[in-house]
Amino acid sequence: MSTPCLYSIIRYAPYAETEEFANIGVVICAPKLGKMSFKLTKSNDARVRNFFKDDTIFHAVKPSIEQELQTACSLVSQIGNPRKVADFFNTFTSPRESIFYYSIPRIILTSAYDAELVRLYKKFIKHTEYTKERREEILVKELRSRFQSHQELKNAFKKETLGGELTRFSMPLVAKNDEHILCAIKPLAFTQDEPSKMLEHCDTWVSRVKRAVTEDIFDLDAVLFTIDSHRKPSIAEQKAIDEIQKTLDNNKICHFRHNDSHSIVQFAKDSI
């Protein structure tokens, strides 16, 4: 027999100004059974660490959310009334100002309460990847913010879809004079799980740029890649980064580390 359950995704958002979060766990409640359970990711979750460039905060604060959830689960087991259990869960997961918060509760029917928690965890946490695309969106926002503090760069860059006869792709930061591209900047995140995927990402963008130059979409010296990578790379990851830098140098594509604000801003100013 199926039992109605409420569940919510536990989210970690250490930096309020970016409004970015990572799903770190699931909490589920079966009011009719008088049960509430949760499952959290490990303190050293590489996805969280790499996404937020954060080696210490999550590890330090995870015990507090774990204790909060354990206390709530204990209280639910003592309530006894299904309606009151549901009210408690909805209140517990209501919006809050904290580095941990919960998604809006959802309802699900299940005949296997414990197995459902595992299934939800696998769906929303274990199999969730904080992709390079999402990381690169954040890097773009950071660059826009940096540029806004320089009068000559304010509102100078826009997202553009560039295309010729044989190529078509988007660049997030493009400055133009009429139809002439003065500067095209693309943040590249090399935070993939495998070094081979890091190299593939590099090769994809090198190929796009070379094709665009061949089709006279822009000049090569107008292009800048900003490079973001693992904060503490493994030996294999560092080898991949070295190879990526060599590839960009060999193809005469300008590149700086993403945290090299001075060089990036100066490149933008010199270009426009």
Image: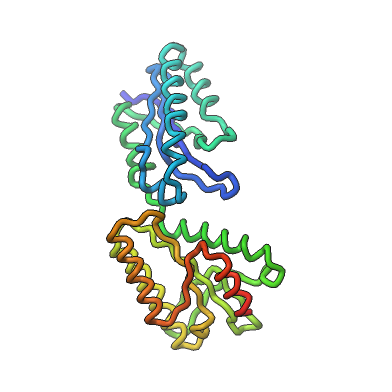
Q: Which of the colour schemes (rainbow, by chain, secondary structure, one colour) is used?
A: rainbow
Q: Residue 209: percent from the left, percent from the top?
A: 44, 79
User: What is the quadrant of the N terminus in the image?
Assistant: top left
Q: Residue 81: percent from the left, percent from the top?
A: 46, 12
- What residue is drawn where x is 61% and y is 79%? 270
Front one among 211 and 33: 211
Q: Residue 199: percent from the left, percent from the top?
A: 32, 68
Furthest residue toward right: 151
Vertical arrangement, residue 111 with respect to residue 44, above or below: above
Front one among 259 and 47: 259
Vertical arrangement, residue 224 with respect to residue 121, above or below: below
Residue 173 occupies quadrant: bottom right
- What residue is drawn where x is 45% and y is 85%? 165
Front one among 193 and 227: 227
Vertical arrangement, residue 212 with respect to residue 133, above or below: below
User: What is the quadrant of the C terminus in the image?
Assistant: bottom right
- What residue is drawn where x is 32% and y is 40%? 122
- 11 vs 261, left or right, is left
